[in-house]
C-alpha cells in the first residue's frame, strides 16, 4: 500500500510540471480563445456572450473567405514548390553523392540556413527581387531590360518564392531520412529483375518514400499557412494571409472576438490537415526491415 | 566442367582504392552446372558474383554470358537473376507482386494472364501456392527465402546467382533448404552460381567448387576431388578439417612415399600417378583427416602413437586430441582424431591421459611441400 502511494507521489512529481505547463500555456489559452470567439464586441468593450455572429461574419464577408482561400492556395503552392525542389535534392544527396563526407557536408549546407534569423532570410528576397535589387541589376547589366522591373516584388509569386526558400529544409530533412533508410539491395534487386532506373524509381523508391513526402508536405504546408512575415515583407496589396488578418483583429481593428473566431477556424483547418496526413502516412507505411 | 560455357570471365579484376577485391581471374561456368564460390570473408567470392550480376563493373577483363559480352552492361540488361543474401524482398508488395515484379514492366513484354500463370507456377515450384496474397512482412525466414527464389527464377534466367542464400536461416531449416536448392537446380536445368563461406554447404550442393582466398582462385574441383586430394594445405584445411603434421621425406619406392615424423615414426603413403616426388630429406607436410585416423590393433602398421590430451564428446563420435611422442625432442605436435562411437569401441580408449595408437591407411595420407602453397 505504501509502495503504491510512493509510486503515485513519484508519478505526480515527474509529470506535474509538464502537465501544469501544458495546462497553463496550451489548454487554458485555447479555452480562452474558443470562448472569446463567441463574445460580442460593443466598441470599445468585449462582452461575454454565446452567439455565432463572428463565424457568420467570417463566412458571409467575402473579404475573409478570399483571404482564407488565398492562404490555402499559397500554402499549397509553397508545398508543391518545396517538394519539386526538395525531392530531387534529397535523392541526389542519398543516391548520387558517393562520398559520405561530401553527403554530410551538402546536407549540412541545406540545414545551416535554419540557424540564420527567419526575418533576415525573408528580407534577403526583398533585396534580391526589389527595384534596385540583384535580379534587376543583373538583367540590366546583361542588357535584357533597360529599366528596372517592378513585377518581381510585392505579389503572390514573390511570396511563394520566399516561403519555398525558407521552408525547403523542412521538406528535405524527412525525405533525406526516408531515402537513406531504403536498403540499396532493393534497388539492386529491382534492376536485377530487368527493371531500368526510371521504373525502379516509380515502383520501388517513390512508394517507399511516401512517408517522408507526407511528413515534409505537412510541415511545409502548416508552416507557410500560418506565416505572416512574408506577406508583410514581399507580399503586395493582394498578398494578405490569414495570419495578417488575425494580427490586425487583435491590433488595429481591435476586434478580439472576431480574431478569436478566425483563430479557431485556422486551428480546425490545421487539425484537418494533420488528420489527413496521418491517414496517408499510415496507408503508405511499410516495415523496412 | 563438362558442357559448353555459359559464363566466362577472362582476365577480370576489381579493386576498391588500394584494396584488391579480385585479382586477375579467369573462370568458366558450364551450362546447367551448380558451381560454388567458397572462401573466407574478403576472399573475392561476393565481388565475383556481383561482377557477373552487373552490380559492380570490372576494372579490367571481359565477362561473357551466353556468348554475349556484358562487361559494361547494367544488371537489367543481363540474362541472370539473383537471390540476395537478406532476400531484398519489396516490403510494399505482396508475395505475388514481388514475384511478378520482373514481369510487370512493359519493356519485359509479358501479358497479364501469362504473368499470373507464371507467378502461380513459380509459387508452386517453391511450395508457397497459398501465400500469394500475403505481405512479405508476415512471412517466416524460410518462406521469405522461397519467395526470393521464386522471384529470381520466374524470369527464366540463363544463370541463377545465389549470394549466401541460406546464411540467414537456422541450422534445421538450412538443411531442408539445401535439399530444395538441389531439387530446383535439377528441375530448372540452369546454371547455379552460389557464394558461401560454409564448406559443408558447398560440398553438399556443388558439381564444382571454386576455392578462393585473398582475391584469387586457389583451386577448382569437384567436391570429392577437393576433399580427397586437395592441391594445397590451405584447401586441405579449409575444406573439411585436416591434421597437417610436419615430416621429412625418405624418398619413394615408386609405389609408396616414405615419411618420417619428428619422433621417428615412419609412415608410408600410397602414391598416385600424377604425384610429385619429394627427394630424400626434404621437409613436407603430411595431411591426415581426423575421421581417417582409426584406433589401432596390436598388429597394425602405419601408426601414430601418443597420449590423449583432450576428448570432446559429439554424440556420434568423440574427437580426441593426441600429443604425439616427442622422442626426437622436436616441438610438440598433436593431431585430432574422430573416433566413431559404437557399442564395441572401447570407451576407455578415449580417456585423457591414456596412451593410444592410431592407424592410417596409406591411401588416406595427403602430401604437401612444407613451404608455400598458400
Image (cartoon, coloured by chain):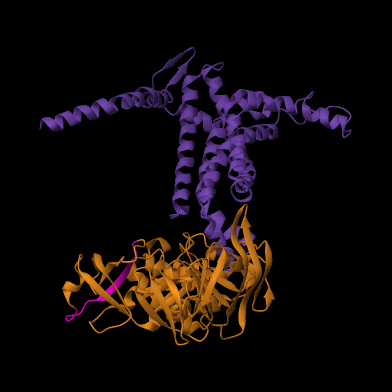
> Residue A159: image x %, image y %?
66, 32
Q: Locate residue B3 relative to residue A263 in the image: left or right.
A: right
Rendered view: A48 above or below B65: above
The colour with which the image depicts chain B is orange
* In magenta segment, residue B363: no
Is residue B37 or residue A240 the one in the foreground?
Answer: B37
Query: Which chain is assigned purple?
Result: A
Q: Locate residue B116 relative to residue A48 in the image: left or right.
A: right
Q: Is residue B72 visible from the viewing direction of this image? A: no
> Residue A99: image x %, image y %?
61, 46
Q: Which residues are magenta?
A: B332-345
* In magenta segment, residue B334: yes
> Residue B221: image x %, image y %?
51, 78
> Residue A129: image x %, image y %?
74, 28
Is residue B352 or residue A200 the one in the foreground?
Answer: B352
Image quadrant occupied by the N terminus of chain B? bottom right
| Numbered circles on residues, count | 0
Rendered view: B179 above or below A26: below
Farthest top residue in view: A44
Q: Quadrant of residue A188?
A: bottom right
Amino acid at each position: 500500500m505504501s509502495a503504491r502511494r510512493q509510486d503515485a507521489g513519484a508519478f505526480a512529481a515527474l509529470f506535474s510540471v509538464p502537465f501544469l505547463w501544458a495546462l497553463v500555456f496550451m489548454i487554458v489559452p485555447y479555452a480562452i480563445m474558443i470562448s472569446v470567439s463567441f463574445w460580442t464586441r460593443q466598441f470599445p468593450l468585449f462582452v461575454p456572450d454565446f452567439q455565432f455572429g463572428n463565424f457568420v461574419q467570417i463566412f458571409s464577408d467575402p473579404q475573409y473567405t478570399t483571404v482564407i482561400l488565398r492562404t490555402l492556395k499559397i500554402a499549397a503552392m509553397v508545398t508543391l514548390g518545396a517538394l519539386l525542389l526538395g525531392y530531387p535534392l534529397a535523392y541526389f544527396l542519398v543516391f548520387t553523392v558517393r562520398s559520405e563526407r561530401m553527403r554530410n557536408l551538402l546536407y549540412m549546407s541545406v540545414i545551416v540556413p535554419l540557424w540564420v534569423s527567419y526575418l533576415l532570410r525573408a528580407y534577403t528576397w526583398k533585396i534580391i527581387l526589389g527595384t534596385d535589387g540583384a535580379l534587376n541589376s543583373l538583367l540590366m547589366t546583361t542588357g535584357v531590360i533597360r529599366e528596372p522591373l517592378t513585377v518581381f516584388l510585392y505579389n503572390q509569386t514573390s511570396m511563394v518564392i520566399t516561403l519555398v526558400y525558407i521552408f525547403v529544409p523542412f521538406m528535405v530533412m524527412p525525405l533525406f531520412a526516408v531515402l537513406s533508410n531504403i536498403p540499396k539491395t532493393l534497388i539492386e534487386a529491382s534492376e536485377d529483375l530487368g527493371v531500368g532506373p526510371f521504373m525502379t524509381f516509380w515502383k520501388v523508391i517513390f512508394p517507399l518514400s511516401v512517408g517522408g513526402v507526407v511528413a515534409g508536405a505537412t510541415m511545409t504546408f502548416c508552416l507557410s499557412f500560418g506565416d505572416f512575415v512574408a506577406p508583410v515583407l514581399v507580399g503586395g496589396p493582394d498578398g494578405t494571409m490569414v495570419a495578417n488578418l488575425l494580427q490586425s483583429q487583435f491590433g488595429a481593428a481591435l476586434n478580439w472576438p472576431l480574431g478569436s473566431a478566425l483563430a479557431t477556424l485556422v486551428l480546425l483547418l490545421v487539425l484537418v490537415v494533420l488528420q489527413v496526413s496521418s491517414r496517408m502516412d499510415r496507408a503508405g507505411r511499410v516495415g523496412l526491415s | 566442367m563438362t558442357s559448353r560455357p555459359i559464363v566466362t570471365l577472362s582476365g577480370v579484376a576489381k579493386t576498391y582504392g588500394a584494396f584488391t577485391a579480385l585479382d586477375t581471374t579467369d573462370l568458366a561456368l558450364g551450362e546447367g552446372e551448380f558451381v560454388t564460390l567458397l572462401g573466407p570473408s574478403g576472399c573475392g567470392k561476393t565481388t565475383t558474383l556481383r561482377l557477373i550480376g552487373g552490380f559492380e563493373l570490372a576494372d579490367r577483363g571481359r565477362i561473357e554470358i551466353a556468348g554475349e559480352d556484358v562487361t559494361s552492361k547494367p544488371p537489367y540488361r543481363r540474362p541472370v537473376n539473383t537471390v540476395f543474401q537478406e532476400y531484398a524482398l519489396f516490403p510494399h508488395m505482396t508475395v505475388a507482386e514481388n514475384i511478378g515484379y520482373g514481369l510487370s514492366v512493359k519493356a519485359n513484354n509479358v501479358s497479364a494472364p501469362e504473368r499470373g500463370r507464371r507467378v502461380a507456377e513459380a509459387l508452386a515450384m517453391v511450395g508457397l501456392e497459398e501465400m500469394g496474397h500475403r505481405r512479405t512482412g508476415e512471412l517466416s525466414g524460410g518462406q521469405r527465402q522461397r519467395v526470393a527464389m521464386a522471384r529470381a527464377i520466374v524470369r527464366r534466367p540463363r544463370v541463377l546467382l545465389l549470394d549466401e542464400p541460406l546464411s540467414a536461416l537456422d541450422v534445421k531449416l538450412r538443411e531442408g533448404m539445401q535439399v530444395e536448392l538441389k531439387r530446383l537446380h535439377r528441375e530448372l536445368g540452369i546454371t547455379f552460381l552460389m557464394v558461401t563461406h560454409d564448406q559443408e554447404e558447398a560440398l553438399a550442393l556443388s558439381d564444382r567448387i571454386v576455392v578462393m582466398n585473398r582475391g584469387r582462385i586457389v583451386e577448382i574441383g569437384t567436391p570429392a576431388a577437393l576433399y580427397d586430394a586437395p592441391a594445397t594445405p590451405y584447401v586441405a584445411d579449409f575444406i573439411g578439417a585436416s591434421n597437417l603434421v610436419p615430416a621429412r621425406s625418405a624418398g619413394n619406392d615408386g609405389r609408396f612415399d616414405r615419411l618420417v615424423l619428428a619422433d621417428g615414426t615412419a609412415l608410408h603413403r600410397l602414391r598416385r600417378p600424377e604425384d610429385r616426388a619429394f627427394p630424400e630429406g626434404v621437409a613436407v607436410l603430411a595431411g591426415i583427416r581426423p575421421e581417417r585416423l582409426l584406433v589401432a590393433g596390436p598388429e597394425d602398421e602405419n601408426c601414430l602413437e601418443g597420449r590423449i590430451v583432450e576428448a570432446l564428446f559429439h554424440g556420434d563420435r568423440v574427437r580426441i586430441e593426441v600429443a604425439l611422442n616427442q622422442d626426437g625432442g622436436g616441438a610438440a605436435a598433436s593431431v585430432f582424431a574422430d573416433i566413431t562411437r559404437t557399442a564395441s569401441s572401447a570407451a576407455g580408449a578415449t580417456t585423457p591421459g591414456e596412451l593410444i595408437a592410431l592407424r592410417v591407411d596409406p591411401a588416406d595420407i595427403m602430401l604437401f611441400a612444407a613451404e608455400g602453397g598458400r
